[in-house]
Amino acid sequence: MTTMSTDGTPTTNASLELEPQAVDAIERYWADRATGPSRKILIGATLAFAELGYHGASTRAIAARADMSPAAVYIHFASKVELFHHIALEGHKTSTGAFNEPAELVADPASKLRMGVASFATFNAEMNTFSRTIEYEMRLHHDQRFADVWRLRRGVEDHMRRILQAGVDEGVFRIADIEWMKILLLSNCIDIARWYRHESPHTPMALGFRYADLAMSLVGAVAP
């Protein structure tokens, strides 16, 4: 059944039950990046968006999870879209950095791919609920206010493309279609956030390096 949230957006009665480990991960994430009331709001909003979706998460729902009043939320963030933009931008800086930064630490294409995929996959497992939220809910936001977030997304795609092209040029990768391989590798890593559960026998790091091994197989390279 569809209802209207308090800020006039449609929502449903359904909500997603979050894993305690996922909640802890979100709280730790914002503890390193915000202080005081802003931190409480960012934690509450991230949890609300994760549970209810962007349209389902009213300002009242966000405030309740932050243990604050709706009026207090507006003191720090002028609107729900501004709040989500802050979460999405910080989240994408972290998620794209999880691929870009390790890949930049090594020189050859095979090592770049392996380290980038291992780190990116690990992030999407460790921060599964947070990653799922910023990935899925970003699909609703294509206007100019989110241009900086979309630049980050395009940037990691370009980085992956350059690595794959360099591997083909150097004869270490055998890829029929670089564009589709880029999509396959990145989307596989992102999809971990959808299905991974913290009670899994596979740790995020072990999963990350397993995905790195699979990536090396898919591009026709031998893992170093």
Image (spheres, rainbow, N blue to C red):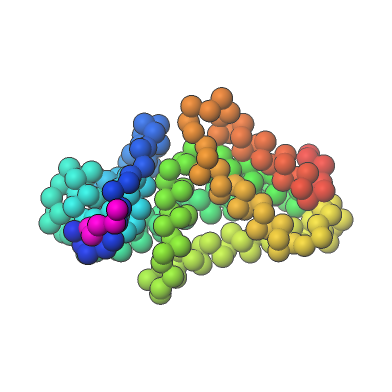
Position of residue 96 in the picture relative to residue 2 (left or right)? right
The residue lying toward the viewer, choosing from 91 and 13, is 13
Q: Is 98 positioned to the left or the right of 3 in the image?
A: right
176 versus 206 height, above or below = below
Q: Is residue 3 magenta?
A: yes
Q: Residue at x 81, y 57 (%)?
A: 175
Residue at 63% in and 41% down: 118
Question: Which residue is pictured at 35% across the width and 38% down the height?
Answer: 17
Seen as rendered, the residue at the extreme right is 171
Quadrant position of residue 79 = bottom left
- What percent of the width, then of the height, locates residue 138? 43, 60
Q: Position of residue 114 (x, y in %)?
A: 70, 44
Residue lying farthest front? Answer: 1
Residue located farthest toward the top when viewing the structure as drawn: 201
Is residue 142 shown left or right of residue 85?
A: right
| Magenta-tinted stretch | 1-5
In the image, is residue 204 above or below residue 159? Answer: above
Q: Is residue 109 visible?
A: yes
Q: How many marks?
A: 0
Which residue is at the front of the view, 19 or 208? Answer: 19
Residue 18: in magenta span: no
Q: Where does the image place residue 49, in percent across and percent down from the top left?
A: 34, 51
Residue 31 location, x and y as percent? 32, 41
Q: Image height check: is 205 above or below 57?
A: above
Residue toward you, 137 or 43: 137
Magenta span dominant secondary structure: strand
**Position above or below: 163 against 150:** above
Depth check: 16 or 213 in front? 16
Which residue sits at x=45%, y=67%? 148
* Quadrant position of the C terminus in the picture: top right
Residue 160 makes an appearance in the image = no
